[in-house]
Amino acid sequence: MTESLTEDNRPIRLKGRSFLTLTLSPEQPFAGWLARLDDLARRSAGFFLNRPVVLDLEGVDLTKAELSDLIAELGKRNVWIMGIEGARLSLLGPGMPPAMKGGRPGPDFDAPKDGADASSGDRPDSANAAPAGGIEGISARDAARPVPSIIVREPVRSGQSVIFPEGDVTIIGSVASGAEVVAGGSIHVYGTLRGRALAGTIGNTSARIFCRKLEAELLAIDGLYKTAEDMDKGLRGQAVQFWLDGDAIRAEALN
Amino acid sequence: MAKVIVVTSGKGGVGKTTSTAALGAALAQRGEKTVVIDFDVGLRNLDLVMGAERRVVYDLVNVIQGDAKLPQALIRDKRVETLFLLPASQTRDKDALTEEGIATVMETLKKHFDWILCDSPAGIERGATLAMRHADTAVIVTNPEVSSVRDSDRIIGLLDSKTLKAENGERMDKHLLLTRYDATRAARGDMLKVDDVLEILSIPLLGIIPESSEVLRASNLGTPVTLADKASAPAIAYQQAARRLAGETLPVAIPGERRSLLEKMFGRRAA
């Protein structure tokens, strides 16, 4: 079927947005763990109500049937799972919450205590997935504090993601084909940009992308995308900067 | 204390097993006790390249599961007495390897050998991550073409995050072994040039192994190329790579550079 072309040729805007979710790490046997969860819920009715919850299955070995049972059991307790982290892809599929990745530790939620509404519970949650090695300025401890920029002192390899919604990312090295850099602010690459660079992902229209040598697969600023095919061929291999001008990404050689 | 080296690539068919055998034999010929371990459980090949396929009784999985002692599974090479093979099982799969089992085997081997070379399976899954887990040094085998280079880049990322060294905050030594390099095709632009590969991967070069029928012939004979014809171009390249692994500083010659000079001379004469 062919759809008639509409007059409106405005590009579709895809934006990133980050939310703080609660992460639940179930432990086996699930019956015991669910009992403890019930205990927690009894102390504070509606603790999970209206809270997005991600299930962290890192290190948990279970079958697809066990997983859907677990999700159903949680559903009975009004815990709605919006995504699953750390699970084998084979476990997931239609009807299951989508896989989540690239999560970073946030401030701990206080578990409700007996009697008191919520005093400051010190639960070092084992939320993992800090970006791979060599990344400065962001760790589990100070992720909660706003940091304006990070510097990555080594090449970003194929398959790696550097995700920093808080601000600028500077890479001293190259970004490989199949790697991605996602920044809330601008992206600076002091090397060859071969992979993807997504700047200004949380609605920053003044974000820019700079690279010493342009070989990128995909660029985006504030949700506006540009693939390698759409880029000016003359800019390939050059030092280039990109910025947003209304609804268009503009590019200019830096030399 | 032994040096543990993983020979890895991400992509299959680039020459990991051939390189493990050739480097292992070259290191053993220096008189240092060397063991090559086949981590490719289910698709074992290293025994064939080493010419030991008829001598395999017990394998790595047997040792891990406690069915055999480590010395029972080690096969001593008939040509070089300091060279040993720990074969993989062909009838099992990678799930038969346990992290604790591998750790115990590696600890024991470290006490008795100078070099432990782990031949990684292709891919980035369990087999490959277990093979790299205990390594101090990685040899990344890459062909001069884009898919191999990108897969190698992916593996380098894993080496920097999934190994014990990386988890302890140490840096893993990584070396690039460029195999199946054909100077004529690189000059024509059909293949990536050495500089292009080095620029993309930005790790030090261990050696360049020229494309050669010698390599295939040695494999089919069940002889590591460094033992088959020691004067052949690939054998010399592997021997030099082994010396660099052992810490020697040798300049890396790009195969065919001399030839391109000859070509220039011929070109001039014809003109």
Image (tube, rainbow, N blue to C red):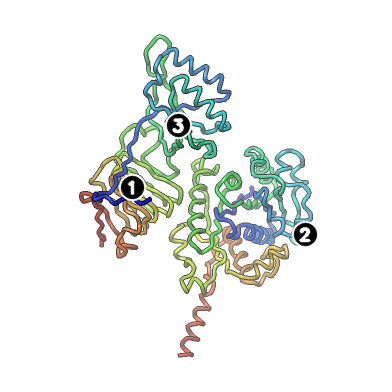
- Residue type indicated by callout 3: Ala
Numbered disc 2: secondary structure: loop
**Residue annotated with mark 1:** A198
The reply to whether label 2 and label 1 mark residues of one chain is: no
**Residue annotated with mark 3:** A127
| Front disc: 2 or 3 | 3
- From the viewer's perspective, tell me whether residue B29 is left or right of residue A142: right
> Label for residue B78?
2
Numbered disc 1: secondary structure: strand
Quadrant housing residue B182: bottom right
Disc 2 packing (10 Å; few <14; some 14–19; many ≥20): few
The reply to whether label 3 and label 1 mark residues of one chain is: yes
Residue at left offset 47%, top offset 74%: B188
**The C terminus of chain A lies in which quarter of the figure?**
bottom left
Separation of residues labelled 2 and 3 (CA atoms) = 52 Å
Q: Nearer the viewer, residue B205 or B153?
A: B153
